[in-house]
Image: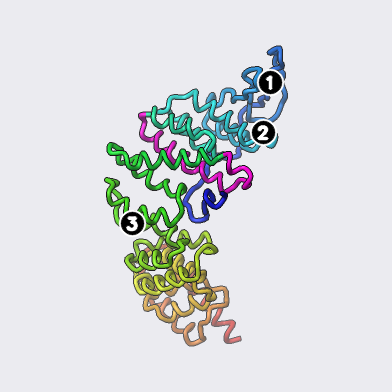
């Protein structure tokens, strides 16, 4: 049962962040209290936090936030962060409190959108029916998009809970999946919502199923995605696919336009990437290296990202990779960047190379106006001169 709902989330570009949550005592809300009622309805007060007020609404122990949006937004951030960090409330109790607040605000309002983002942290999968109803009854497209992202990310709860609890969420998971499929294949779907549905559908199916969807079914939909965008959506799933041909074919048909996406996912780790898929990535890196290096138009970020990814995939020491790149480069600025970025005394540069590099860099003196490049050249020159002194001592 667990395998059916376990979602590999290591490659998914999902973040759970509040708006502007900054711990700043100077903007904290004044001291507030936890207020509950006894059976007679009499108020019972207890100090709990300097930035949060939770009240008990009735005899059924319904808790709610008081005056959440009465002050500046940072105060609302502080109150919600305090709520999320409370140890004595369960995840469901926190969800109920925020859900109660969500229902106080019109779906087109800032407060509604803000709280939808906040509750995402708690993955309220048990509210799947309520959320799909809310989506259907909402006309604001931005709010609908946020609800779709919330529904999708909430299913990731199935990868976090104990196997014994999975049966409690099976119906909710399948409800979300069926709802997404129904909306994706709706004839009158708005393009903005269709794109959001397609992007977030990946948490509801296996990587191989999602790849099949992107390669076949998506062609029948008026989605408006470019081929490059679709390839970027395929990439994280191809990297962990059971079929090595998926990644090999994808990378073979792609140029450097997909490289940054590859670097980003590789930086998260390759423990779920098979040896066959690593071979495909290695081949791709070798194929694009001539376009990345010895090319003045390529940003240094891309060069550094290529090196970091190559180290992970090839299993070769980074110093050796950089040393070879310096030796093969014809661009003094590129050589200077590699030296300034990576030299820690471990690069394999001979005394002859060092002297030659010093002369190359010194020959650019006064010819370059870009101060960032000048700084890189000066740093590289300093490193090389220190290496030269050390070698001659």
- Judging by the rendered image, the residue that carries numbered circle 1 is 36
Residue 198 placed where, x, y %?
37, 46
Camera-nearest residue between 238 and 108: 238
Residue farthest to the front? 1
Residue 377 placed where, x, y %?
44, 70
Left or right of 350 in this view: 197 = left
Please report whichever mark, 3 or 1, sits nearer to the chain's N-terminal start: 1
Q: Is residue 157 magenta?
A: yes
**Magenta part of the chain:** 139-168
Classify 178 as above or below 359: above
Instruction: Find residue 89 and name its label.
Output: 2
**Are the residues at dot 1 and dot 2 in contact (C-beta closer than 8 Å)?**
no
Q: CA distance from mark 3 to mark 1?
A: 55 Å
Residue 330 showing in the rendered view: yes
Q: Is residue 31 magenta?
A: no
To which quarter of the image does residue 91 belong? Answer: top right
Residue 356 placed where, x, y %?
44, 84
Residue in view at x 35 percent, y 58 percent: 231
Camera-nearest residue between 363 and 230: 230
Residue in view at x 45 percent, y 72 percent: 279
- Judging by the rendered image, the residue that carries numbered circle 3 is 215
Image quarter where the C terminus lies is: bottom right
């Amino acid at each position: 049962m667990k395998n059916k709902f376990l979602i590999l989330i290591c490659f998914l570009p999902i973040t759970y962040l509040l708006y502007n949550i900054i711990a700043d005592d100077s903007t904290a809300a004044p001291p507030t209290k936890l207020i509950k009622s006894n059976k007679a309805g009499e108020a019972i007060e207890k100090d709990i936090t300097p930035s949060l007020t939770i009240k008990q609404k009735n005899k059924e122990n319904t808790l709610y936030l008081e005056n959440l949006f009465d002050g500046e937004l940072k105060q609302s951030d502080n109150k919600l962060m305090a709520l999320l960090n409370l140890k004595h409330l369960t995840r469901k109790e926190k969800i109920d409190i925020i859900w109660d607040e969500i229902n106080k605000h019109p779906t087109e309002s800032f407060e509604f959108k803000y709280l939808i983002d906040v509750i995402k942290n708690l993955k309220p999968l048990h509210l799947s029916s309520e959320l799909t109803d809310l989506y259907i009854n909402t006309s604001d497209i931005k709010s609908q998009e946020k609800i779709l992202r919330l529904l999708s990310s909430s299913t990731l709860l199935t990868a976090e809970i104990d196997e014994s609890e999975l049966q409690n969420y099976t119906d909710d998971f399948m409800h979300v999946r069926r709802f997404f499929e129904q909306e994706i294949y709706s004839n009158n779907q708005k393009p903005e919502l269709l794109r959001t549905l397609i992007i977030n559908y990946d948490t509801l199916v296996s990587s191989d199923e999602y790849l099949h969807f992107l390669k076949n079914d998506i062609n029948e939909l008026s989605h408006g995605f470019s081929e490059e965008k679709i390839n970027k959506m395929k990439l994280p799933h191809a990297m962990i696919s059971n079929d090595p041909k998926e990644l090999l074919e994808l990378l073979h048909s792609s140029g450097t336009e997909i490289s940054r996406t590859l670097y980003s996912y590789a930086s998260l780790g390759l423990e779920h990437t098979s040896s066959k898929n690593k071979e495909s990535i290695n081949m791709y890196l070798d194929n694009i290296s001539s376009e990345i290096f010895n090319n003045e138009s390529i940003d240094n970020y891309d060069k550094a990202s290529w090196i970091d990814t190559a180290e992970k995939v090839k299993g070769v020491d980074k110093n050796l990779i950089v040393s070879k790149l310096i030796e093969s480069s014809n661009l003094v600025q590129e050589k200077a960047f590699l030296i300034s970025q990576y030299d820690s005394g471990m690069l394999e540069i001979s005394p002859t190379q060092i002297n030659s590099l010093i002369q190359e860099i010194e020959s650019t003196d006064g010819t370059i106006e870009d101060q960032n490049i000048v700084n890189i050249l000066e740093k590289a020159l300093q490193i090389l001169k220190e290496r030269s002194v050390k070698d001659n001592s």
